[in-house]
Amino acid sequence: MDEQALLGLNPNADADFRQRALAYFEQLKISQDAWQVCAEALAQSIYSDDHIKFFCFQVLEHQVKFKYSELTEVQQQLIRETLITWLQAQMLNPQPEKTFIRNKAAQVFALLFVTEYLTKWPKFFFDILSVVDLNPRGVDMYLRILMAVDAELVDRDVVHTSEASYYFALTLEARRNTLLKDTMREQCIPSLVESWYQILQNYQYNNSELTCQCLEVVGAYVSWIDLSLIANERFINMLLGHMSVEVLREEACDCLFEIVNKGMDPIDKTKLVESLCQVLQSAGLFSIDQEDDVDFLARFSKLVNGMGQALIASWTKLIKNGDMKSAQDTLQAIEAKVALMLQLLIHEDDDISSNIIGFCYDYLHILKQLSALSDQQKANVEAIMLAVMKKLTYDEEYNFENEGEDEAMFVEYRKQLKLLLDRLAQVSPELLLASVRRVFNTTLQNWQTTRFMEVEVAIRLLYMLAEALPVSHGAHFSGDVTKATALQDMMRTLVTSGVSAYQHTSVTLEFFETVVRYEKFFAVEPQHIPTVLMAFLDHRGLRHTSPKVRSRTAYLFSRFVKSLNKQMNPFIEDVLNRIQDLMELSPPENGYQALLSSDDQLFIYETAGVLIVNSEYSAERKQVLMRNLLTPLMEKFKVLLEKLMMAQDEDRQMALADCLNHAVGFASRTSKAFSNKQTVKQCGCSEVYLDCLQTFLPALSCPLQKEVLRSGVRTFLHRMIICLEEEVLPFIPSASEHMLKDCEAKDLQEFIPLINQITAKFKIQVSPFLQQMFMPLLHAIFEVLLLPAEENDQSAALEKQMLRRSYFAFLQTVTGSGMSEVIANQGAENVERVLFTVIQGAVDYPDPIAQKTCFIILSKLVELWGGKDGPVGFADFVYKHIVPACFLAPLKQTFDLADAQTVLALSECAVTLKTIHLKRGPECIQYLQQEYLPSLQVAPEIIQEFCQALQQPDAKVFKNYLKV
């Protein structure tokens, strides 16, 4: 071996050595006999370095996995012997091998097993057992090999190639695995089970590591072997014995869980679970101590959950089968576990509690199906409810300012509890409402002296009722009087209690979330609006010390104002005055930290716009207020743009460009209050937005930070096309001219949707403009598409693909808006060039989205120009290029009908052929029958069949024919 290259296997080696080692590994993988050198090194223990040993196993693994069939019988025998020799050496070595080497060796054994067991090595396990006997190191390897074999037979890790070959490989592997498992069940499983029993009996008191490994093996295999081999008195008694041994009980728990999880007849399953429970209970395992070992209790909780869910599955099957007597017995067995379930659900450790939620959820599902609940069942529902309420509570350790992994886990756990609460509401909505009301009222009466987590959870429960007790369109305060009164009372308490002043971010946020969730309350009791508005606007909300609270409040405030709409009228000017300082554009040189980020300010601007537009003021007053809102932005914009033009430092340029972009974004956001031009005119606001346009457009000619500035102005233009309609048109030509200068793929890709919007909206009105800018736009697109790119540059290839799609979308918009004269008037040479790009897009690029668009364009052009009075030469183009495209595209290897987009492309291809037939009539059929299809060597009967399908009046018939 190349000793120098082997030095690079050490993790501490420098990069050059490591690179050389990798290259050497690749070289050995393709070498014919390198595996023999590695086999010899392992059999004779030539190397002591762990990384080299691991490397040798990797080379062997590659040989067995990918090139085994190339070996002669003698060579295959050599690999078997090498592994057995290595295994024998393990029991004599002074020190055991490192774990990572043993695991890799076990993987190679397992690969050899799946390759040879059915043919050349039927005594695989017996040979290993005869070598290892009860030697602890040998047993360790035997158990690792068993786990590796199970992973090969049960796991589904097939190398993905294409989807079709993946499923084919998966099916082959599944068949092979089934055959291997069947053969093992017949030939060796009883012997293996016996060996496990011997190992457990031998090592349970003196080698906990091997015992746990063996229990893991039993748990893994129990899912696919005959259960009676394990679920019998001697095995179960041994496992139950392990449940009281501290170092073994977690693994024993998991093993029992796998036994309980095994699919079987419902009556047998109930008997099995009940017999296990009796023994566990008599061993004292059903009395849960809060101070007990939480790791074990988490596993035990999972076991109880498995037993509970297994019983519920049996009950469901028995009910379905109509066996009411057995179902009743099973239900009693389930009820008997509820007390234990509740102990685990309420446990202070969330992992223990989380593991039992499945059983709890399914139990409630049973209760939901029963016609009436017994007193005990009602008590159980109430106990679950109280447990959920208690467990929803944050603990002292929760870090609100810097949420990490533990916090994320608690958030997920809360989501599970929410599902339980929703299920409780389905079982007994009245009880849930009464329980929440009791907790809520008790807590809010004394909120000043109550810990934050209890206050937060009380408000949280009120919030959760909104989803747990569903109504249409949030109408919680009408309909059912009891429910409406209860919710109304709680909301009144929430907004009048003063709890919004509680000094903890979690309570503050929950207050605002709940106020917005129940916004319909304020339609019923509008007198509380000023109180809540003040909470939003002062130090409790938008001016809170926590940036997190300020940010969330900005969004919630926007929602609150939008939802209350007309009720806001008396407060508009006051609110606008109070938020004025929050809307200041903070230029980079100010140096002070604004209260709100620019993203948060977007919500405030939108809110201001909504307040003005939805107010009952006159148009004149609205215009004044909107001008007051937008003028500071325009003034700042002019100053900042001048500064940007003179800025030398790139960081400063970027900061100024961002600030300019924010100004444009804020102005855009105010316009969201308008739905169309009508509403802008009614409010008298057209003029102020036109002023904004004139202020912002000069930024397009700024040579610095083009991408940022263009992006902002483009977005503003999109909004103005909706708000100002044709009043925008005078600004479009010069804006387009600037945006087409020195542009890259991304610029064009984002500019084209703007032109599409204008074309689709104004159609014939913009025809002169489109005719003028059509070829300049196309030249810019072609120039970018023709730029050379690195062969492996994925992002450049993707950008070009997206630009190509945008280009075809533009042509589709032009032709689909009845503006084909825009193309026709570009001169014959340009028209031809455009048409050829569409043909190329339909056939040559393996992009079904673009292909679909191209066929839509072609069928539209045929519809417009394909008749007798169409442009000169177009009929020829149809037969020479469009018809062939309809056949060449689907014949491409890349045209994959398993892909949904490709099916849509084929459908449009069929529409194109139908449109050609519609416009050209019998002449088209004659061309296909006598010239084109014969030139493709298509059989006469197929040609006949094709032409008949094409002539069917129903387009679906032809589409389906083409698919087949």
Image: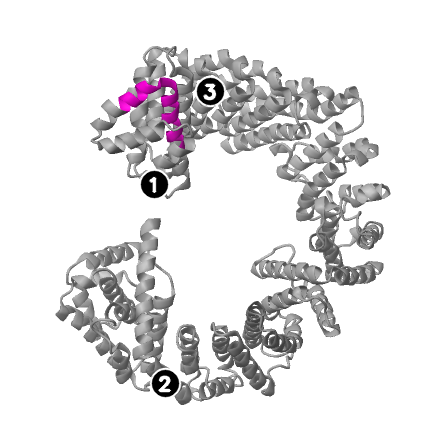
Please, what is the three-letter code of the amino acid marked with disc 1?
Asp
Please give the name of the residue rendered at 33% of the width and 53% of the height, measured from the top-left corner. 166
Q: Which residue is mark 2?
A: 194
Residue 185 percent location from the top left of the image: 34, 76
* Number of residues whose C-alpha sits closer than 10 Å to that of mark 3, classed few (under 14), some (14–19) or many (20 or more): many
Residue 914 counted in the magenta span? yes
Whether residue 806 sits left or right of residue 943 in the image: it is right
Distance Cα–Cα, label 1 vs label 3? 29 Å
Distance Cα–Cα, label 1 vs label 2? 53 Å
Compared to residue 26, the image places residue 115 above or below, namely: below
The numbered dot on residue 376 is none
* Number of residues whose C-alpha sits closer than 10 Å to that of mark 1, classed few (under 14), some (14–19) or many (20 or more): some
- Front-most of residues 897 and 722: 897
- Dividing the picture into quarters, in which one does residue 796 lie? top left
Please, what is the three-letter code of the amino acid marked with disc 3?
Val
Magenta highlight range: 907-928
Residue 499 percent location from the top left of the image: 80, 53
- Dividing the picture into quarters, in which one does residue 3 lie? bottom left
Labels 1 & 3 near each other (Cβ < 8 A): no
Please give the name of the residue rendered at 77% of the width and 38% of the height, measured from the top-left corner. 564
Q: Which residue ends up furthest to the right in the rendered image? A: 527
Q: Which residue is mark 1?
A: 896
- Front-most of residues 759 and 544: 759
Q: Which residue is mark 3?
A: 814
Q: Secondary structure at mark 2?
A: helix
Whether residue 713 sits left or right of residue 603 in the image: it is left
Please, what is the three-letter code of the amino acid marked with disc 2?
Glu
Q: Earlier in the sequence, mark 2 or mark 3?
A: 2
Labels 1 & 2 near each other (Cβ < 8 A): no
Q: Secondary structure at mark 3?
A: helix
Query: Can residue 781 be seen here?
Result: yes
